[in-house]
Image: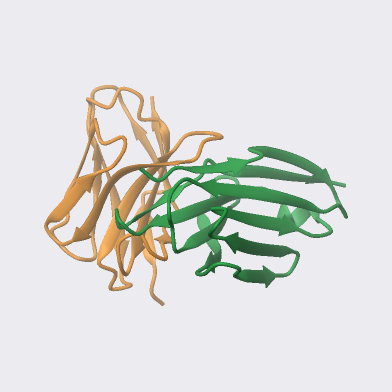
Chain colours: A orange, B green
Amino acid sequence: DGGITQSPKYLFRKEGQNVTLSCEQNLNHDAMYWYRQDPGQGLRLIYYSQIVNDFQKGDIAEGYSVSREKKESFPLTVTSAQKNPTAFYLCASSIRTGLDYTFGSGTRLTVV
Amino acid sequence: ELKVEQNPLFLSMQEGKNYTIYCNYSTTSDRLYWYRQDPGKSLESLFVLLSNGAVKQEGRLMASLDTKARLSTLHITAAVHDLSATYFCAAYNTNAGKSTFGDGTTLTVKP
């Protein structure tokens, strides 16, 4: 079955560390996205990618980095520059940018 | 810039009652989505509305779209506990080529 997989489900980061969240899809979708969700809040766009080797900043890109070397994969790195990274991170994909999102199951990141 | 506003943000209702969640968007959009999120879970697609006057129904939920008023509604009929969740709308911005999400409406259905 086609779908979008995020790993790990839970992630703990020490102060000053970089961590990478994985997002893989086998839906043959061109576009992929990363969102951050804080408790009781909506979704805020971090980065998105419309095609391989291209990506754009979203509304809250500072302290994050991404790569899109393969169509299937869009990993997100939370760097030490992100001062408040504790949140729920959702990856999504769509066949065309902005349309008909499929979401992954999310990664909950906690700073310890 | 497309902005999406939902209201109310929090809704507590009794089982068996009806209620409506509103989703207003600020600029032209030709596609409106509704999603459901259970606590700690991902977003599940409920409806996509493509044209003015579009209405879609699934069980106790009915969504509609008025593109002239830039308004979509999600109507809940005879609520049951299983409908307790957070509901998001998202409007597609044709010019920007991306969707913008509302802040979500957290619905709690009490016995």
In the figure, B1 relative to B34: above or below?
above
- Residue at far bottom of view: A1
Percent x, y for residue A24? Answer: 29, 61
Q: Nearer the viewer, residue A8 or B7?
A: B7
Q: Where is residue A99, by image quadrant?
A: bottom left
Q: Point out the image quarter for the N terminus of chain A.
A: bottom left
Q: Point out the image quarter for the C terminus of chain A.
A: top left
Percent x, y for residue A47? Answer: 27, 45
Percent x, y for residue B99? Answer: 39, 54
Q: Is residue B74 left or right of residue A109?
A: right
Q: Where is residue B63, by image quadrant?
A: bottom right
Q: Is residue B10 left or right of residue B97?
A: right
Q: Going 57% across and 53% down the picture, which residue do you hit?
A: B69
Q: Going 59% across and 60% down the picture, which residue do you hit?
A: B66
Total marks shown come to: 0
Q: Is residue B72 left or right of residue A51?
A: right
In the figure, A82 relative to B82: above or below?
above
Percent x, y for residue B13? Answer: 81, 44
Q: Nearer the viewer, residue B7 or A58?
A: B7
In the figure, A103 relative to B48: above or below?
above
